[in-house]
Image (spheres, rainbow, N blue to C red):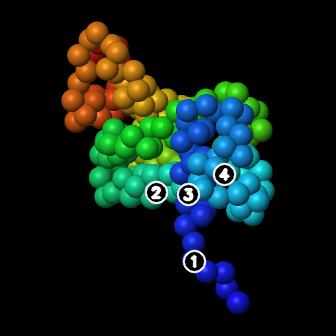
């Protein structure tokens, strides 16, 4: 007989996400998460065999939706510059929940080699090949430099366009300088990736 439908798993994920974002994975006791979710520690272990499995499920819940949007942005019929701007525009539109999970991922990747490895494996089946395919198509179409290794082009696409957006969203309000609008930011980051930051000769 099938189990009755329940929201326990969703409650556990929400409680874990709130605890993990506030105190990190290691600073979040599973008993406290269970209490926040109004369930037992046994139910936490029923759904998630370890705290790391719970952490990955918290990430996956947000990542899978973001990944679908990134896939759609990179599948557009435009040239590489257009796909790049669509990618950056989606990242610029990241929700507060997505930003919380990005901060969580960054913190845990720096604090745990086990979690870093698990995240690397997941991302290697997620946004990394999507961006790599877009870069490969850009090289094949003659839109990107062919003298640079595709891995370098992919790293530049990610590092120069996505990380600054997350950083500006997180610390932007505390900076004393005015920030560009979202549209300006996505366009200018794509411009910087494609043409560099040096003044034209």
Task: For residue 137, say whether it is visible.
Answer: no
In this picture, is 160 found above or below 49? Answer: above
Task: Identify residue for label 3.
Answer: 11
Q: Which residue is mark 4?
A: 34
Q: Would residue 198 be seen by someone viewing this image from the given angle?
A: yes
Give the alpha-carbon distance from disc 3 to disc 2, as whole Å.
18 Å
Mark 3 residue crowding within 10 angstroms, few (<14) / some (14–19) / many (20+): some
Residue 14 position within the rendered picture, expressed as x and y whole percent measured from the top left: 53, 51
State the CA–CA distance, disc 3 to disc 1.
13 Å
Mark nearer the N terminus (3 vs 2): 3
Please give the residue where the numbered disc 2 appears in the rendered image: 65
Look at discs 3 and 2 and give the one toward the viewer.
3
Give the residue at x 65% y 58%. Answer: 39
Q: Nearer the viewer, residue 168 or 159?
A: 168
Coordinates of residue 36 in the picture (x, y in percent) = 59, 48
Residue neighbourhood size for the residue with mark 1, other residues' Cα within 10 Å, grouped as few (<14), some (14–19), many (≥20): few
Q: Which mark is residue 5?
A: 1
Instruction: Kindly report the distance in space between the C-alpha atoms of the residues bearing marks 1 and 4.
Output: 19 Å
């Amino acid at each position: 007989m099938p189990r009755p439908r329940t929201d326990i798993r969703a409650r556990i994920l929400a409680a874990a996400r709130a605890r993990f974002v506030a105190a990190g994975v290691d600073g979040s006791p599973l008993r406290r998460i269970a209490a926040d979710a109004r369930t037992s520690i046994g139910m936490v272990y029923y759904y998630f065999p370890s705290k790391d499995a719970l952490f990955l499920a918290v990430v996956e819940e947000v990542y899978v939706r973001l990944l679908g949007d990134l896939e759609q942005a990179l599948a557009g019929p435009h040239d590489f510059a257009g796909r790049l701007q669509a990618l950056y525009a989606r990242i610029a539109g990241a929700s507060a929940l997505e930003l919380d999970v990005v901060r969580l991922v960054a913190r845990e990747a720096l604090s745990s080699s086990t979690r870093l490895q698990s995240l690397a494996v997941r991302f290697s089946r997620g946004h990394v090949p999507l961006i790599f395919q877009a870069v490969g198509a850009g090289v094949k179409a003659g839109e990107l430099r062919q003298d640079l290794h595709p891995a370098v082009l992919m790293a530049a696409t990610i590092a120069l366009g996505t990380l600054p957006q997350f950083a500006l969203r997180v610390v932007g309000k505390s900076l004393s300088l005015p920030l560009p609008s979202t549209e300006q930011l996505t366009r200018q980051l794509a411009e910087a990736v494609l043409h560099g930051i040096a003044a034209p000769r």
